[in-house]
Amino acid sequence: MTRPIPILLILLAIVLPLSLLAGRVWIDPAETPNAALILADLRLPRSLLAIVVGAGLGAAGAAMQGYLRNPLADPGLFGIGPGAALGAVVALWFGYTHSAWLLPLFALAGAGGAMALLAAIAGRTGGIALFTLAGLMVASLAGALTALAISLAPNAFAMETIVMWLNGALTDRSWQDVWIAAPLIGVGILVLRLAGPSLDALTLGEAVARSLGVRPTRLLWLLVAGVGLTVGAVTAVAGIIGFVGLIVPHLVRPLTDRRPSQLIIPSALAGALLVLIADSVVRVLPLMTELRLGIALSLLGAPFFLWLLLRMRRGEL
């Protein structure tokens, strides 16, 4: 069995410097004017944010698939991402964009509201089925309210801003976005890692897990907190970026012993690598305007999801 963590760290160490040079205009540190300023203030925070965002989504996806025991599970099923998006849309709808802190704060408030609603509906029982249905309900409600906000946008500029933001991107992000997202996502990944042993026991079935001392309610709270922090922070700074949490656990699972606890950190690193590469690619594509990162990953993720469905139909998952 290959140890994926050293391999992924080496790949990140190789790709990160290349991502700093990549862009519509490639940077030659020896010849490009103000190269140090461009790298330090523009390219480096964007690349680090890509790593942080990918790590959060990858870890959340691995934990979700372990908790639901479903290889097609995605962090969006919790409804926390749509809740965060709704909070950001409210900020954009009212024009609260003059302060760089307001939009992320509204998004985090939306994620917190979704977490509170999930806890109110399913928090006492800790049942997986009820929790899944509650997550789908929260996601549906948040999506409907987001669509309502778009349809009632006060002007065309606000509508365009909302739609563009929802597509997800790391364009024009700064060090401030890194300082907002990195601590929250770091704590979220730590919480998910703490849930790892209980997720391992859950693979044997709920009854066996209870007999081994797993407390379903505590596990549920760890998952809600971990996914809420990671996905909420990602959405707060980057918008909706899908499929990362679905894709990367499948890519690294064959390199592990397939226990959920051993999949979370490798999935975080693989997610960081995937988003960093994808963001570098959208920067260098010869298009009139930069392709939104969320669209690019959806174009990659949709065929991958179809492939997983076909494998599941043939009984290979």
Image (cartoon, rainbow, N blue to C red):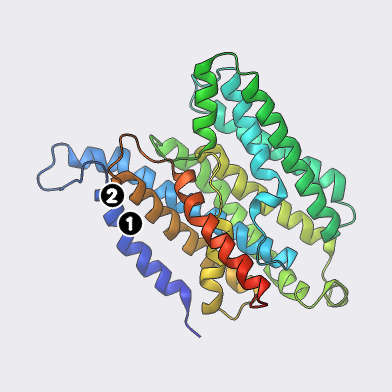
**Type of amino acid under label 1:** Leu
| Residue 86 numbered tag | none
Q: Quadrant of residue 311?
A: bottom right
Tell me what residue is drawn at x 86 percent, y 45 percent.
121
Q: Is residue 206 above or below residue 98?
A: below
Q: What is the secondary structure assignment of the residue under circle 1?
A: helix
Q: CA–CA distance between discs 1 and 2?
A: 6 Å
- Counting labels gives 2
Looking at the image, do the residues carrying marks 1 and 2 touch, with CB atoms under 8 Å apart?
A: yes
Q: Which residue carries the number 2 mark?
A: 20
Q: Position of residue 242 (x, y in %)?
A: 56, 49
Tell me what residue is drawn at x 49 percent, y 31 percent.
164
Tell me what residue is drawn at x 38 percent, y 34 percent.
172
Q: What is the secondary structure assignment of the residue under circle 2?
A: helix
Q: Position of residue 9 (x, y in %)?
A: 40, 67
Q: Which residue carries the number 1 mark?
A: 16
Q: Residues within 10 Å of mark 1 (few under 14, many from 20)?
A: many
Tell me what residue is drawn at x 54 percent, y 55 percent.
302
Seen from this angle, which residue lies furthest bottom? 1
Left or right: 258, with 132 as reference point: left
Q: Is residue 160 above or below residue 229?
A: above
**Type of amino acid under label 2:** Leu
Q: Position of residue 259 (x, y in %)?
A: 65, 76
